[in-house]
Amino acid sequence: MKSEVDAFLHYATVERGMSTNTVSAYRNDLAGFTLYFAEDTGDLALSDWRSITPEHVNELLADMDERGYSPATRSRKIAALRSFMKFLVEERVLEENPTSHIRTPRAGRPVPDVLTSTDVEALLDSAAHGTAPEDRRDHVMIELMYAAGLRVSELVSLDVTDVNLRSATVRTLGKGSKERIVPLHEVAVSAIESYLQGVRPQLANRAQSDSMFLGRRGRRLSRQAFWQRLKHVAARAGINAHITPHTLRHSFATHLLQGGASLRHVQELLGHSSISTTQIYTHLTSEHVRTEYDKAHPRA
Protein backbone atom coordinates (compact mmCIF):
# COMPACT_ATOMS: atom_id res chain seq x y z
CA MET A 1 0.00 0.00 0.00
CA LYS A 2 2.92 2.31 0.71
CA SER A 3 4.23 2.10 -2.86
CA GLU A 4 1.04 3.64 -4.28
CA VAL A 5 1.24 6.45 -1.72
CA ASP A 6 4.87 7.14 -2.66
CA ALA A 7 3.93 7.21 -6.35
CA PHE A 8 1.11 9.67 -5.66
CA LEU A 9 3.34 11.98 -3.63
CA HIS A 10 5.90 11.98 -6.45
CA TYR A 11 3.11 12.81 -8.91
CA ALA A 12 1.81 15.58 -6.64
CA THR A 13 5.27 17.13 -6.41
CA VAL A 14 6.54 16.75 -9.96
CA GLU A 15 3.42 16.84 -12.14
CA ARG A 16 0.93 18.77 -10.03
CA GLY A 17 3.49 21.14 -8.59
CA MET A 18 1.96 21.10 -5.11
CA SER A 19 3.72 23.10 -2.43
CA THR A 20 6.09 21.42 -0.01
CA ASN A 21 3.69 22.07 2.87
CA THR A 22 0.73 20.54 1.02
CA VAL A 23 2.70 17.45 0.02
CA SER A 24 3.96 17.08 3.59
CA ALA A 25 0.40 17.31 4.95
CA TYR A 26 -0.83 14.79 2.37
CA ARG A 27 2.03 12.46 3.27
CA ASN A 28 1.02 12.52 6.94
CA ASP A 29 -2.68 12.11 6.15
CA LEU A 30 -2.15 9.19 3.77
CA ALA A 31 0.23 7.48 6.19
CA GLY A 32 -2.51 7.76 8.80
CA PHE A 33 -5.10 6.33 6.40
CA THR A 34 -2.81 3.42 5.49
CA LEU A 35 -2.26 2.56 9.14
CA TYR A 36 -5.95 2.99 9.96
CA PHE A 37 -7.13 0.59 7.27
CA ALA A 38 -4.41 -1.99 7.81
CA GLU A 39 -4.29 -2.12 11.61
CA ASP A 40 -7.49 -4.09 12.16
CA THR A 41 -8.20 -7.78 11.71
CA GLY A 42 -11.93 -7.26 11.18
CA ASP A 43 -14.05 -7.08 8.06
CA LEU A 44 -12.78 -3.64 7.10
CA ALA A 45 -9.07 -4.48 7.17
CA LEU A 46 -7.23 -3.69 3.93
CA SER A 47 -4.10 -5.30 2.58
CA ASP A 48 -4.33 -3.69 -0.86
CA TRP A 49 -5.85 -0.45 -2.15
CA ARG A 50 -7.68 -2.48 -4.81
CA SER A 51 -9.98 -3.72 -2.06
CA ILE A 52 -11.13 -0.31 -0.84
CA THR A 53 -14.85 0.39 -1.08
CA PRO A 54 -17.19 3.31 -0.24
CA GLU A 55 -17.91 1.37 2.95
CA HIS A 56 -14.30 1.75 4.06
CA VAL A 57 -14.48 5.46 3.29
CA ASN A 58 -17.70 5.89 5.28
CA GLU A 59 -16.12 4.20 8.28
CA LEU A 60 -13.12 6.52 8.02
CA LEU A 61 -15.38 9.58 7.89
CA ALA A 62 -17.22 8.35 10.97
CA ASP A 63 -13.89 7.96 12.74
CA MET A 64 -13.05 11.58 11.86
CA ASP A 65 -16.33 12.64 13.45
CA GLU A 66 -15.50 10.68 16.56
CA ARG A 67 -12.10 12.32 16.86
CA GLY A 68 -13.65 15.78 16.63
CA TYR A 69 -11.40 17.17 13.90
CA SER A 70 -11.86 20.84 13.09
CA PRO A 71 -13.61 21.63 9.78
CA ALA A 72 -10.29 22.76 8.28
CA THR A 73 -8.48 19.55 9.26
CA ARG A 74 -11.36 17.39 8.11
CA SER A 75 -11.49 19.21 4.75
CA ARG A 76 -7.75 18.74 4.22
CA LYS A 77 -7.86 15.06 5.04
CA ILE A 78 -10.82 14.48 2.74
CA ALA A 79 -9.06 16.41 -0.04
CA ALA A 80 -5.98 14.22 0.40
CA LEU A 81 -8.00 11.03 0.22
CA ARG A 82 -10.04 12.17 -2.80
CA SER A 83 -6.93 13.23 -4.70
CA PHE A 84 -5.21 9.96 -3.91
CA MET A 85 -8.20 7.86 -4.99
CA LYS A 86 -8.54 9.88 -8.21
CA PHE A 87 -4.86 9.20 -8.90
CA LEU A 88 -5.36 5.45 -8.36
CA VAL A 89 -8.25 5.48 -10.84
CA GLU A 90 -6.18 7.37 -13.42
CA GLU A 91 -3.35 4.87 -12.92
CA ARG A 92 -5.88 2.04 -13.36
CA VAL A 93 -5.16 0.63 -9.94
CA LEU A 94 -8.85 1.13 -9.18
CA GLU A 95 -11.77 0.85 -11.56
CA GLU A 96 -14.03 3.21 -9.60
CA ASN A 97 -13.41 6.04 -7.18
CA PRO A 98 -14.68 5.01 -3.71
CA THR A 99 -14.75 8.66 -2.59
CA SER A 100 -17.05 9.90 -5.37
CA HIS A 101 -20.01 9.98 -2.95
CA ILE A 102 -18.30 12.35 -0.49
CA ARG A 103 -19.81 15.80 -0.41
CA THR A 104 -17.54 18.81 -0.06
CA PRO A 105 -17.48 19.72 3.65
CA ARG A 106 -19.45 22.81 4.54
CA ALA A 107 -17.94 25.72 6.36
CA GLY A 108 -18.46 25.52 10.09
CA ARG A 109 -19.21 22.51 12.22
CA PRO A 110 -21.59 20.07 10.47
CA VAL A 111 -24.90 19.21 12.11
CA PRO A 112 -24.67 15.59 13.31
CA ASP A 113 -26.97 12.84 12.12
CA VAL A 114 -29.25 11.49 14.84
CA LEU A 115 -31.83 8.73 15.11
CA THR A 116 -35.34 9.35 16.33
CA SER A 117 -36.28 7.71 19.62
CA THR A 118 -38.51 5.37 17.57
CA ASP A 119 -35.54 4.33 15.44
CA VAL A 120 -33.45 3.70 18.55
CA GLU A 121 -36.17 1.47 19.98
CA ALA A 122 -36.36 -0.42 16.67
CA LEU A 123 -32.58 -0.80 16.65
CA LEU A 124 -32.49 -2.16 20.19
CA ASP A 125 -35.44 -4.44 19.52
CA SER A 126 -33.70 -5.82 16.42
CA ALA A 127 -30.49 -6.40 18.37
CA ALA A 128 -32.35 -8.17 21.19
CA HIS A 129 -33.77 -10.82 18.87
CA GLY A 130 -30.45 -12.52 18.14
CA THR A 131 -29.65 -15.69 20.09
CA ALA A 132 -26.01 -16.35 19.14
CA PRO A 133 -23.37 -15.11 21.64
CA GLU A 134 -22.18 -12.49 19.13
CA ASP A 135 -25.74 -11.22 18.67
CA ARG A 136 -26.31 -10.95 22.39
CA ARG A 137 -22.99 -9.14 22.76
CA ASP A 138 -24.00 -6.68 20.03
CA HIS A 139 -27.25 -5.96 21.84
CA VAL A 140 -25.39 -5.09 25.04
CA MET A 141 -22.89 -2.91 23.17
CA ILE A 142 -25.64 -0.93 21.47
CA GLU A 143 -27.59 -0.65 24.71
CA LEU A 144 -24.50 0.58 26.57
CA MET A 145 -23.44 3.00 23.86
CA TYR A 146 -26.85 4.67 23.80
CA ALA A 147 -27.17 4.57 27.61
CA ALA A 148 -23.83 6.29 28.23
CA GLY A 149 -23.11 8.23 25.02
CA LEU A 150 -19.73 6.56 24.60
CA ARG A 151 -17.41 7.05 21.65
CA VAL A 152 -16.86 3.79 19.80
CA SER A 153 -13.18 3.83 20.78
CA GLU A 154 -14.23 4.15 24.43
CA LEU A 155 -16.73 1.33 24.07
CA VAL A 156 -14.33 -1.22 22.61
CA SER A 157 -11.57 -0.18 25.05
CA LEU A 158 -13.64 -1.04 28.11
CA ASP A 159 -12.40 -3.69 30.50
CA VAL A 160 -14.69 -5.72 32.72
CA THR A 161 -13.54 -3.75 35.76
CA ASP A 162 -14.65 -0.46 34.15
CA VAL A 163 -18.32 -1.33 34.69
CA ASN A 164 -19.65 -1.14 38.25
CA LEU A 165 -23.01 -2.88 38.40
CA ARG A 166 -23.53 -2.03 42.06
CA SER A 167 -23.26 1.73 41.51
CA ALA A 168 -24.73 1.47 37.97
CA THR A 169 -21.86 3.38 36.38
CA VAL A 170 -19.27 2.95 33.65
CA ARG A 171 -15.78 4.40 33.83
CA THR A 172 -14.09 5.43 30.61
CA LEU A 173 -11.03 7.30 29.43
CA GLY A 174 -11.83 9.89 26.77
CA LYS A 175 -9.62 12.19 24.78
CA GLY A 176 -6.36 13.07 26.46
CA SER A 177 -6.87 10.12 28.85
CA LYS A 178 -9.47 12.20 30.68
CA GLU A 179 -11.46 9.95 32.98
CA ARG A 180 -15.20 10.28 33.39
CA ILE A 181 -17.80 8.17 35.15
CA VAL A 182 -21.21 7.95 33.49
CA PRO A 183 -24.38 6.65 35.15
CA LEU A 184 -26.34 3.79 33.61
CA HIS A 185 -30.06 3.11 33.65
CA GLU A 186 -31.50 -0.16 34.98
CA VAL A 187 -32.15 -1.71 31.56
CA ALA A 188 -28.49 -1.30 30.57
CA VAL A 189 -27.27 -2.66 33.92
CA SER A 190 -29.49 -5.73 33.58
CA ALA A 191 -28.29 -6.36 30.02
CA ILE A 192 -24.63 -6.04 31.04
CA GLU A 193 -25.11 -8.37 33.99
CA SER A 194 -26.66 -11.04 31.78
CA TYR A 195 -23.86 -10.63 29.25
CA LEU A 196 -21.12 -11.01 31.87
CA GLN A 197 -22.71 -14.08 33.41
CA GLY A 198 -23.91 -15.98 30.37
CA VAL A 199 -22.41 -14.61 27.15
CA ARG A 200 -18.88 -13.36 27.72
CA PRO A 201 -17.68 -16.74 29.10
CA GLN A 202 -18.70 -18.31 25.78
CA LEU A 203 -16.68 -15.74 23.82
CA ALA A 204 -13.65 -15.80 26.11
CA ASN A 205 -12.67 -19.27 24.87
CA ARG A 206 -10.03 -19.64 27.60
CA ALA A 207 -8.29 -16.47 26.41
CA GLN A 208 -6.69 -14.41 29.13
CA SER A 209 -8.29 -11.06 28.48
CA ASP A 210 -9.76 -8.33 30.65
CA SER A 211 -11.61 -6.87 27.68
CA MET A 212 -15.30 -6.30 28.16
CA PHE A 213 -16.36 -7.09 24.61
CA LEU A 214 -14.77 -10.01 22.81
CA GLY A 215 -14.79 -11.39 19.30
CA ARG A 216 -14.99 -15.05 18.30
CA ARG A 217 -11.33 -15.69 19.06
CA GLY A 218 -11.58 -14.25 22.55
CA ARG A 219 -9.79 -11.04 21.61
CA ARG A 220 -10.96 -7.48 22.12
CA LEU A 221 -13.53 -6.55 19.50
CA SER A 222 -12.31 -3.81 17.15
CA ARG A 223 -14.18 -0.60 16.35
CA GLN A 224 -14.36 -1.60 12.66
CA ALA A 225 -15.89 -4.97 13.50
CA PHE A 226 -18.48 -3.34 15.75
CA TRP A 227 -19.33 -0.78 13.05
CA GLN A 228 -20.04 -3.63 10.64
CA ARG A 229 -22.18 -5.45 13.19
CA LEU A 230 -24.15 -2.27 13.92
CA LYS A 231 -24.92 -1.83 10.23
CA HIS A 232 -26.32 -5.36 10.03
CA VAL A 233 -28.54 -4.76 13.05
CA ALA A 234 -29.76 -1.44 11.60
CA ALA A 235 -30.57 -3.06 8.25
CA ARG A 236 -32.48 -5.82 10.02
CA ALA A 237 -34.44 -3.14 11.90
CA GLY A 238 -35.40 -1.47 8.62
CA ILE A 239 -33.52 1.74 9.42
CA ASN A 240 -32.61 3.38 6.12
CA ALA A 241 -30.73 6.34 7.58
CA HIS A 242 -26.94 6.33 7.36
CA ILE A 243 -25.79 5.01 10.72
CA THR A 244 -22.39 4.78 12.38
CA PRO A 245 -21.43 4.10 15.99
CA HIS A 246 -21.13 7.86 16.49
CA THR A 247 -24.78 8.25 15.46
CA LEU A 248 -25.72 6.62 18.77
CA ARG A 249 -23.60 9.14 20.69
CA HIS A 250 -25.22 12.02 18.81
CA SER A 251 -28.66 10.53 19.49
CA PHE A 252 -27.87 10.11 23.19
CA ALA A 253 -26.97 13.80 23.54
CA THR A 254 -29.88 15.08 21.46
CA HIS A 255 -32.49 12.96 23.24
CA LEU A 256 -31.21 14.05 26.66
CA LEU A 257 -31.54 17.71 25.69
CA GLN A 258 -34.97 17.12 24.21
CA GLY A 259 -35.94 15.48 27.49
CA GLY A 260 -34.94 18.56 29.49
CA ALA A 261 -31.33 17.84 30.52
CA SER A 262 -29.12 20.91 30.84
CA LEU A 263 -26.38 21.62 28.33
CA ARG A 264 -23.76 21.57 31.11
CA HIS A 265 -24.82 18.11 32.26
CA VAL A 266 -24.75 16.73 28.72
CA GLN A 267 -21.31 18.28 28.24
CA GLU A 268 -20.08 16.44 31.32
CA LEU A 269 -21.61 13.14 30.25
CA LEU A 270 -20.06 13.37 26.78
CA GLY A 271 -16.67 14.39 28.15
CA HIS A 272 -16.45 17.56 26.06
CA SER A 273 -13.76 19.94 27.29
CA SER A 274 -15.61 22.93 25.85
CA ILE A 275 -19.34 23.58 25.99
CA SER A 276 -19.15 25.05 22.47
CA THR A 277 -18.68 21.48 21.20
CA THR A 278 -21.88 20.40 22.94
CA GLN A 279 -23.84 23.39 21.63
CA ILE A 280 -24.12 21.80 18.18
CA TYR A 281 -26.96 19.71 19.60
CA THR A 282 -29.02 22.76 20.55
CA HIS A 283 -29.78 23.33 16.87
CA LEU A 284 -31.37 19.90 16.71
CA THR A 285 -33.36 20.41 19.90
CA SER A 286 -34.61 23.75 18.57
CA GLU A 287 -35.95 21.92 15.53
CA HIS A 288 -37.61 19.42 17.87
CA VAL A 289 -39.28 22.23 19.83
CA ARG A 290 -40.56 23.76 16.59
CA THR A 291 -41.98 20.41 15.47
CA GLU A 292 -43.72 19.88 18.79
CA TYR A 293 -45.06 23.43 18.66
CA ASP A 294 -46.50 22.91 15.18
CA LYS A 295 -48.16 19.68 16.31
CA ALA A 296 -49.58 21.08 19.57
CA HIS A 297 -50.57 24.70 18.92
CA PRO A 298 -54.19 25.02 17.76
CA ARG A 299 -53.32 27.81 15.34
CA ALA A 300 -50.13 26.22 13.96
Image (spheres, rainbow, N blue to C red):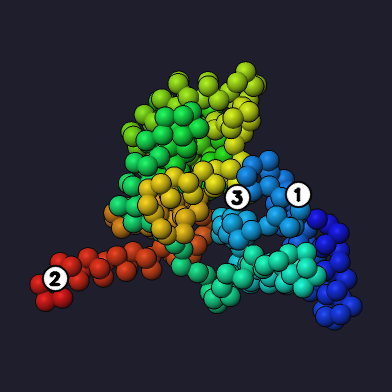
Residue extending farthest to the top is 206
Q: Name the residue beneath numbered marker 1.
A: 47
One can see residue 266 in this view: no
Dividing the image into 4 quarters, which one contains the C terminus?
bottom left
Tell me what residue is drawn at x 42 percent, y 29 percent. 131
Amino acid identity at mark 2: His
Would you identify the image quadrant in which residue 54 lies? bottom right
* Numbered disc in front, either 1 or 3: 1
Locate residue 217, reporting x and y percent: 63, 28
Which of the two residues, 98 or 109, is positioned nearer the viewer here?
A: 98
Tell me what residue is drawn at x 58 percent, y 75 percent. 104
> Which label belongs to residue 297?
2
Would you identify the image quadrant in which residue 100 lies? bottom right
Q: Secondary structure at mark 3?
A: helix
* Numbered disc in front, either 3 or 2: 2
* Numbered disc in front, either 1 or 2: 1
Q: Earlier in the sequence, mark 1 or mark 3?
A: 1
Q: Secondary structure at mark 2?
A: loop
Residue 4 falls left or right of residue 174 = right
Residue 44 falls left or right of residue 189 = right
> Which label belongs to residue 175?
3
Q: CA distance from mark 3 to mark 2?
A: 43 Å
Amino acid identity at mark 3: Lys
Q: CA distance from mark 1 to mark 2?
A: 58 Å
Q: CA distance from mark 1 to mark 3?
A: 29 Å
Instruction: Please give the count of numbered marks on the rendered protein.
Output: 3
Q: Residues within 10 Å of mark 2 (few under 14, many from 20)?
A: few
Q: Earlier in the sequence, mark 3 or mark 2?
A: 3
> Which label belongs to residue 120?
none
